[in-house]
Image: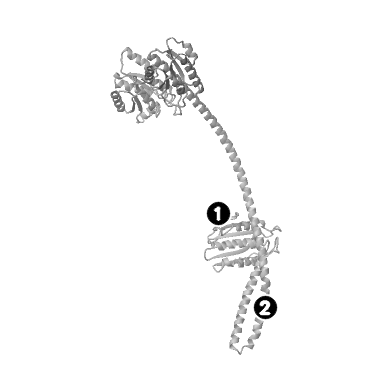
Amino acid sequence: MNAETALRADRAGEAPHILLVEDSETQALQLRRMLEGEGFTVSRAATAEAALEGLNGPLPALVIADYHLPGMNGDELVRRIRLNVRARALPVLMLTDAEGSAHGGDLERQGLESGADAYAPKSAGRELILLRLRALLRRNVGEAAAMPDAPGTAFRRARLLLVDDSPTHRLWLSSLLTGDGDSVEAVSSAEAEAAASRSGDPWDGVLVNLAGLGPEGLELCRSLDAIRAQGPVGGFRIVALEGARAAPAAAFEAGADDVLPAEAGAEAIRLRVRALVRRNLLREENRRIEDAMREQLREVERARAEAASAEARAALTGALERANSELETANRALRDTQGKLVQAAKMASLGELVAGIAHEINNPLAFILAHQGTVSRLLAQVAPRVAQDPEAKRAVEKATVRAEAMTLGLRRIQDLVQNLRKFSRLDEAGTQEVDVPEAISTVLVLLTHKLSGRIVVDRDFTAPRILRCSPALLNQVVMNIIGNAADAIAETGRIRVATRTEDGNYVIEICDTGPGVPEAIRARIFEPFFTTKPVGSGTGLGLSIAYAVVESHRGSIVVDDAVGGGARFTIRVPLESHVPTEDAV
């Protein structure tokens, strides 16, 4: 939560979050109670180091920090906050115990110079602290918001390598630097190169005590400088503590970035190391900002590239859709043509098969009929001669009845063969004069197995008997429609076949009492392979072929509702129809 969202939360009734950095348990408790009583939520850190760790999570609305803290002081904490690009806009209120003295003025100056936004002595009372706090929250509205979390923007402790061959001096320097909140590793000169080149988190600085090392100390600085050159750009900083008689120029030439006397006081050493750490952290933050800017530029370029790619994809998609539409149209036409050719081939094969079967049956049938007539005449001649013998008489009478029944059955077979030959019409190509009632009667005979005794067929032939057309108009179109009507009638029903002339057209109308054709699919029933029958019960080609046959006659076929329910198919062909001499299909 940044300051703007904190103030909005305060106005909305939500409690802004404040981070309190105070090492005193008593004063921390008093300040927490005061702030929570004013509607704030408070979290506390006892040290500056702990506060920096806490700032790696969600940012508070404001930080209240005591100047005097164990380890890193409050002013150094503020400097570290201002070095971080993510938290540098965070308002900070500095507190101290001093008031009214010159020392207190110095603390205020140091606190404000470090980057704190306001200063207040603890003894000033809660009113002044609260006024300062609310003014900071108000003033921060509209200023630059905190940078969103990003990899590498977290607070961290500076890592320092201390090289000193004196255990006592090494312990003193280590305690001094650790007090500023830095992570310090102390080693002897013999261990320095191995520690400096160790993989892992890079060092921010290396402090080398040259006192007592002699020429080996300068050589160590050169080795550290070479190790630094092999690492990340910039690398760590080298600070040399020189002996009383050493020349600073030699240390600088050996690779040191800063040189100060070994007998320098603790405050001088701390200030030099602080400056080194601050410079390194600033350089690191600058690299992060530059990386973020480069990443933003890459995002902009990527967005532009994606936009251009999207436009190209849209154009390509449009072209593909048009091509797919044209391809689908071509495929549909190809499927229609293929279906018609398949059905035509099937009908041609069926015609040849029917004609062949009819021919094969007709020869033995004529032979049987001739001999059956002979048997009937002989029985008639034998009957008077056995009139006196009752038993022989009964046998002859029974044989006569059976012969007459055989004659009836053979005649029915003969009629069926003739109808099959009429249906095949192999010797009739192109247009010819067709006896419509006779052709329809032939179709009905062939559909006897579907009609049986459950469907009554009404006939109303008012049009002329003779129509010049292709036999397929009756053999395929009428047969397909009547067959479909019979399939649609579940139990018993009626089919009406009527002919008439109308406006120069020969009209064949077929009505049934079935469920009819739903209006939603009427536009599709003439499409190839479209069927409402169960899978395996129909090919979906019958009505498509019927449509093609009627179209070849320059006619039309439509379906609507029959009077009283069911479907009505109306076929219209011109009375002077001219059909190609090839197969109509």
Q: Where is residue 145? Give x, y as percent.
A: 43, 26
Residue at disc 1, secondary structure: helix
In the visual, does 40 lie left or right of 242? left
Query: Dot 2, crowdedness within 10 Å: few (<14), some or many (≥20)?
Result: few
Q: Is residue 426 above or below residue 91?
A: below
Residue at the image point whose x is 58% and y is 53% from the top: 524
Q: Where is residue 232? Give x, y as percent.
A: 50, 23
Foreground of the two, 307 or 440:
307
The colour scheme applied to this rendered structure is: one colour
Residue 544 visible? The answer is: yes
Q: Where is residue 321? Give x, y as percent.
A: 59, 43
Between marks 2 and 1 in the image, the one whose residue lies nearer the viewer? 2
Instruction: Identify which amino acid the numbered label 1 is placed on.
Output: Ile
Assess whether mark 1 and mark 2 are in contact (beta carbons under 8 angstroms): no
Which quarter of the rendering shows the N terminus? top left
| CA distance for labels 2 and 1 | 57 Å
Q: Is residue 565 above or below residue 84?
A: below
Label disc, if present, on residue 155 of the rendered structure: none
Sequence-wise first label, 2 or 1: 2
Which quarter of the rendering shows the C terminus? bottom right
Q: Quadrant of residue 150?
A: top left
Residue 503 visible? The answer is: no
Label disc, if present, on residue 521 of the rendered structure: 1
Task: Check disc 2 and report the residue beneath it.
Answer: 371
Residue at disc 2, secondary structure: helix
Instruction: Identify which amino acid the numbered label 2 is placed on.
Output: His
